[in-house]
Amino acid sequence: MNRKELLHNLLPQTQCRRCGFADCKAYADSMDRGISSPNLCPPGGEATREALFSVLGMPVDPIGAIHKDEEILIARIYEDECIGCTKCIQQCPTDAIIGAQSVIHTVVEQWCTGCSLCVSVCPTDCITLVPISDLALRISAHESGVRYSEMKERLAVHGRLEEQREYLDVEDHEQESLKDIVAAALDRKGQVLEE
Ligand code: SF4
Ligand code: SF4
Ligand code: SF4
């Protein structure tokens, strides 16, 4: 594994863009090339920051401690106010939101990294981040990175609309369980999932 891969693997893979880069990989690349400081990833907390400095062979900068260990957050959608515009799905880096055009949307909480990218795009302000007490309830950095890579590959091949259709149409076990989650969300709103 080269240094860029090592730096990338140390990052929390929320793909939240708070470092100012398009994703964790782009930030790792910039650090590896000596352009960016290892101080720019708030979700990583102190442990990640120190590990990044170590891999880069730099002393930890005490003045650069711009972030503390943060609360663990995940997104929730207030489904009564969702108009099914799909803007949130288009932002989510881990495919943690399911729904379809003009149909209620909901968060698959075990896949949510708490990146917050969905929150600001919602036209009805019906997405909020809520704290969870147990880190084990949240997707691991490794799984998040894998889901992000898979999403990008799928988008490159099919585009976003095909991907959304895939959630509701295909038959395998995981997709069936996603349909159940959508059906439960619709049920909460007093609607029925059309087959
Ligand atoms: S977790 Fe967010 S802030 Fe940290 S490197 Fe990845 S995209 Fe940047
Ligand atoms: S549901 Fe929202 S907060 Fe969670 S990973 Fe997707 S975009 Fe980020
Ligand atoms: S952005 Fe808001 S209104 Fe649009 S689908 Fe997502 S939750 Fe619903």
Image (cartoon, rainbow, N blue to C red):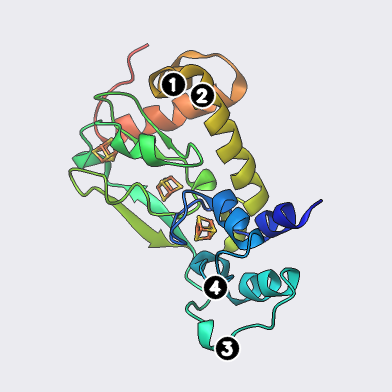
User: How far across and how far down the image is residue 183, in percent?
Assistant: 38, 27
Residue 165: quarter of image: top left
Position of 57 with respect to 96 (left or right) is right
Please name the residue shown 51% across and 24% down the image. Answer: 156
Q: Where's the C terminus, which quadrant?
A: top left
Q: Which residue is mark 2?
A: 156
Position of 71 with respect to 129 (left or right) is right
Q: Which residue is mark 4?
A: 39
* Mark 3 surroundings: few (<14), some (14-19) or many (≥20) residues within 10 A: few
**Extreme residue in the right direction:** 1
- Rounded to the nearest angstrom, the CA distance separating label 3 from label 2 is 41 Å
Q: Which residue is mark 1?
A: 159
User: How far across and how far down the image is residue 139, in percent?
Assistant: 59, 50
Q: Which residue is mark 3?
A: 62
Question: Which residue type carries mark 2?
Answer: Ala
Image height of 185 relative to 52, above or below: above
- Tell me which numbered mark, 4 or 3, is placed earlier along the sequence: 4
User: How far across and how far down the image is residue 186, in percent?
Assistant: 31, 30
Label 1 vs label 4, nearer the camera: 4
Mark 1 residue element: loop
Please name the residue shown 59% across and 46% down the image. Answer: 144
